[in-house]
Image: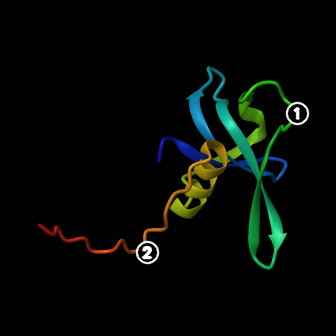
Amino acid sequence: MDNIKLIRMVSGEEVIAKVLQETQDGGLLLKNPCILLPAGQGRLALVPWMPYAETENMEVPSKVVAFQVTPKSDLVNEYNTMNSGLIVPDKSVASPKLTLVE
């Protein structure tokens, strides 16, 4: 999953990001962090965590990180779509069966 993690901050925020490395103090260097926000009716919205920052990488000290886990693949796909512009197809989508005609 390209080291993409779901991170709970001590403030209660849930952030999804690519973890580039752990810092010497146990903190995290994050790429393209996004916060998860409730969007109503059981849905979530992904929003850039610091939308007005000049950089896409952010160092977060260990004292603000409660824990990190591996997110579900659907959430990873949404995160990747948001950050790459590519749409990841659903696994349940069937492709048509092709046959060669001579």
- Circle 1 residue: 52
Residue drawn at 48 percent across, 42 percent down: 2
Left or right of 11 on screen, residue 95: left
CA gap, disc 1 and disc 2? 37 Å
Horizontal and vertical percent position of residue 63: 76, 34
Label 1 neighbour load within 10 Å: few <14, some 14-19, many 20+: few
The quarter of the picture where the C terminus appears is: bottom left
Relative placement, left or right, of 15 versus 94 is right
- Provide the residue designation for mark 2: 92
Identity of the residue drawn at 66% across and 49% down: 82
Residue 31, placed above or below residue 91 = above
Sequence-earlier tag: 1 or 2: 1
Farthest residue to the left: give it. Answer: 102
Where residue 16 sits: x, y (%)? 67, 48
Amino acid of disc 1: Tyr
Residue that protrudes farthest toward the right in the picture: 52
Residue 63: assigned label: none
Name the secondary structure under disc 2: loop
Callout 1: helix, strand or loop?
loop
In front of the other: 40 or 99:
99
Residue at position x 59%, y 47% in the image: 5
Going by the picture, which residue comes out furthest to the top? 24
User: Would residue 102 be found to the left or right of residue 42 on screen?
Assistant: left
Image coords of residue 70 (percent x, y): 54, 53
**Mark 1–mark 2 CB contact (< 8 Å):** no
Colour scheme: rainbow
Residue occupying the point 19% across, 71% down:
99
Quadrant position of residue 37: bottom right
Name which quarter of the figure residue 94 lies in.
bottom left
What is the crowding at mark 2: few (fewer than 14 residues within 10 Å), some, or many (at least 20)? few
Please, what is the three-letter code of the amino acid marked with disc 2? Ser
